[in-house]
Amino acid sequence: MEIVPLTGVSGAAFGQSRASVWAVRGEPASAFRRGADAPLTDMSADESYVFFEYDDADLLHAIEIASPGPVILHGVPLLGRPEDEVVGELRAAGHEVVAEEEAGSIGWALPALGVTLGGTVQDTDGFESGRFRGVPATLDAFEFFEGPDGRSGPGEAVVLPHRGIGAVRLGAARSAMRRLLGPGIGSVPEFGAAWQDTFFSGVVLAYDADETVVRIAVTGRTSVGHDGVPLLGRPRRDVRAQATEAGLRVLDREAELVFPDAGFSVLTARDGDALPTTAVVLPAPAPPPAGTRLW
């Protein structure tokens, strides 16, 4: 497969909408979430080793090609070959290749080209996949942090429409949330926010540049409800049925139930009514378009 770094592949350019990729390349064979609260990733219908990752605005963010997919970068075959050969040839071609110990947990990286190479195939000792982004790759910085003794998460929580989940509030300070929720890992996400904390209790918080909460995600490790309807770890059809019976407005989207009147969504790992729900996500309301009168 021919992939142009920082640009994309035929019919799928970075920054292109999911709908427009479908219009050119056809619908995917399947779609899934790489994490409980992650956006959807499409698996190509024509090439099962090609994956298209989208951001939270449904724009193409990254393309991953897995072994045994043939992928060549500037004349160098990347997959199914010994790592030292691949890295040596890339460096000989003039590319900066950063080793794992220099790039956190992302494996080998070509930062200027937005490329990461990771995993090995046991029978060939080669790279298992190549991941390509539309922007130069920054080295991931992870920070392990501790919290006050005895703090391990929100426990049972209810959604407060457009405000928060349990004791976690949109607009709250990052320092306050760490005191509330206990230990976790801080990072710089690839898109959507300036900072992110992933708490060991199953809460994921995104922050803006001022380190205030702009997105709350609670995974299936805790209990979350809304108007008496339990939301997590249940078949999607059961959540929808009970919510509808309770008089709540629910909209169906792919692998998602949207509660528009309360401003949150309930996600599943892929599309399917029998699948259990994996996360409740409450984002900050989008600001009105420029020039909108608020009175």
Image (cartoon, helix red, strand yellow):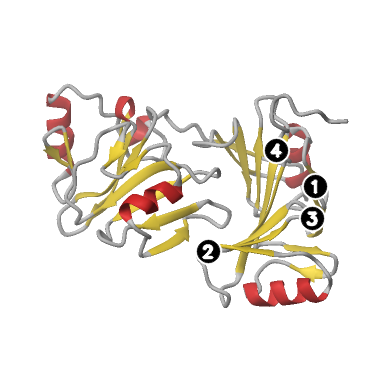
82 left or right, relative to 29: left
CB within 8 Å, label 1 to label 3: no
Helix, strand or loop at disc 3?
A: loop
Ranked by sequence position, the earlier of labels 1 and 2 is: 1
Ranked by sequence position, the earlier of labels 2 and 3 is: 3
Helix, strand or loop at disc 2?
A: loop
Residue 133: percent from left, percent from top: 37, 36
Q: Residues within 10 Å of mark 3 (few under 14, many from 20)?
A: few
CB within 8 Å, label 4 to label 1: no
The amino acid pointed to by label 3 is Asp
Helix, strand or loop at disc 4?
A: loop
Question: Of tags 2 and 4, which is closer to the observer?
Answer: 4
Ranked by sequence position, the earlier of labels 4 and 1 is: 1
In the displayed orientation, state which residue is furthest to the right: 295
Where is mark 1, residue-wise? 162
Residue 103: percent from left, percent from top: 38, 32
Give me the C-alpha separation between circle 1 and circle 3.
9 Å
Where is mark 3, residue-wise? 261
Where is mark 2, residue-wise? 269
Q: Which of the two residues, 48 or 46, is positioned nearer the viewer here?
A: 46
Question: Of tags 1 and 2, which is closer to the observer?
Answer: 1
The amino acid pointed to by label 1 is His
Residue 98: percent from left, percent from top: 30, 29
